[in-house]
Image (cartoon, helix red, strand yellow):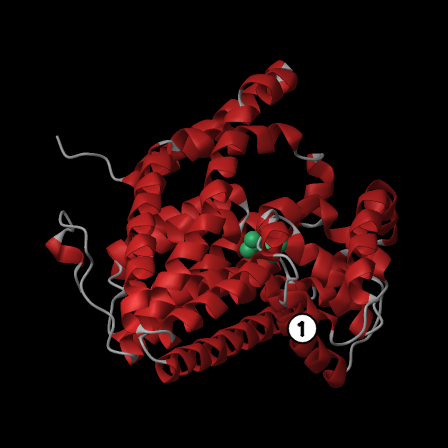
Amino acid sequence: MKKLELHWKIIIGMIAGVGIGFLAVSLGLQQWVENWIKPFGTIFINLLKLVAVPLIIVSLIKGIAELQDISKLSRMGGRTLIIYVFTTVIAVSIGLLVVNIFKPGNRINEQTRQELLDNFGTDAGAKITMAAEQKGQGPLQALVDIVPDNIFSSMTDNRNMLQVIFFVVLLGIGLILIDKEKAKPVIAFIDGLNEVILKIIDLIMLAAPIGVLALLASLVVESPSLDLFKALLSYAICVIIGLSIMIFGFYPLFVRFFTGKSARFFFKGIAPAQLVAFSTSSSAATLPVTMERVTEHLGVDDEVSSFVLPIGATVNMDGTSLYQGVAAVFIAQAFNMDLTLMDQLTIILTATLASIGSAAVPSAGMIMLVIVLGSVGIPEAGLALIFAVDRPLDMLRTVVNITGDSSVSMVVAKSLNLLGEPKVKEWDENYKK
Ligand code: ASP
């Protein structure tokens, strides 16, 4: 019998998880799920996060050292960043288009608005405080934050990924510049370590179906009341329409146009990473899987994926920027505020920057949304309006975030002649093109 492919196993895990969640709610067994099922989800996310930092370190050093000269590095870096900004701006613009057409905020009546503000005011307040801490620090603080003063403390927090990347890029550059004979053993060691970590990821992924089952079951039992969900349905649908346009329209065309590969090839290769992103709501936690899928199944050379993906997981968040655009306009509509064209252009700019600044962890996009709201004078308390549906939307935007990173890695690889055939041997011939 043909072995069931990983993404099918994960999908079965997800469906079972949602089923178990609803069953537990109807039987009043929420606490049981919290005690006996949720821990397996937490263990799965922990395992992924555990390998994320070591993976970034070894793969990025290896990637840069293999480039062998600095001009190649700056070529790849420049190209990557330009394409990342381009896809992000496209995403926010699509979001704004959708929300301006459907105007979901106009459907929120006074009573629902008050109910949402009352229910989620405190939760939203916590996020606003977190954002204020980031905001009140001067215009160049974001730049200062990239340069760590102690690499070990940076490595202890997945939010500091950009600092780790900065240090590792320096190491890689150092390795390129020193005597080749001296660099050789260091690179060989890193190379071996890289293989070990990739093997560990294979092992962790064996547990993925169980991990996502546990994550989704606990999510269902922790969800807020369905009534508030319904009030926000038209807003959620706008975000989903925008995200779907990116996933099913923009990326397949983008990949097809620049690499000649079909949508089927792309999705088949990346599906397990998308499912993990959906279940964990974290691009950082998903990074190990994205990395493995892109190199082994989409044919992107290590040199490219090990550079483009860790940076992408941290700075390229198309789904997040799209969501921030929709959410900002939705809140403005709900408060009966009129936004001028200039306001909307400001939203494109700030949502692009805010998504770059969002950490690759659950609900980070919502914290940075405060900055987008502030830029055009929308009340920050409006965050409470969208709280109830944020988690499911976070799951979906994280899928878009990692899909964006993967598509860009293919395009960059192609442009440098580093896009080959998938490495996996059992790859079905039908999907090669
Ligand atoms: N959870 C998202 C991610 O990790 C960030 C966000 O909250 O939008 O990609």
42 relative to 102 in the view: left or right = left
Residue at 53%, 64% in the rendered image: 167
- Vertical order, 420 against 365 (above or below): below
Residue at 35%, 68% in the rendered image: 65
Quadrant of image for the N terminus: top left
- Vertical order, 48 against 103 (above or below): above
Mark 1: amino acid: Leu
Where ligand 1 lies, by image quadrant? bottom right
Task: Quickly name the residue at label 1.
Answer: 143
How far across and down, in percent of the image, does residue 92 sit? 59, 72
Near-viewer residue (168 or 27): 168
Near-viewer residue (275 or 264): 275
Residue at 29%, 79% in the rendered image: 416
Near-viewer residue (272 or 233): 272
Quadrant of image for the C terminus: bottom left
Q: What element carries label 1?
A: helix
Q: How many residues crowd around disc 1 within 10 Å: few (fewer than 14), some, or many (20 or more)?
A: few
- Vertical order, 6 against 221 (above or below): below
How far across and down, in percent of the image, does residue 252 sit? 35, 67
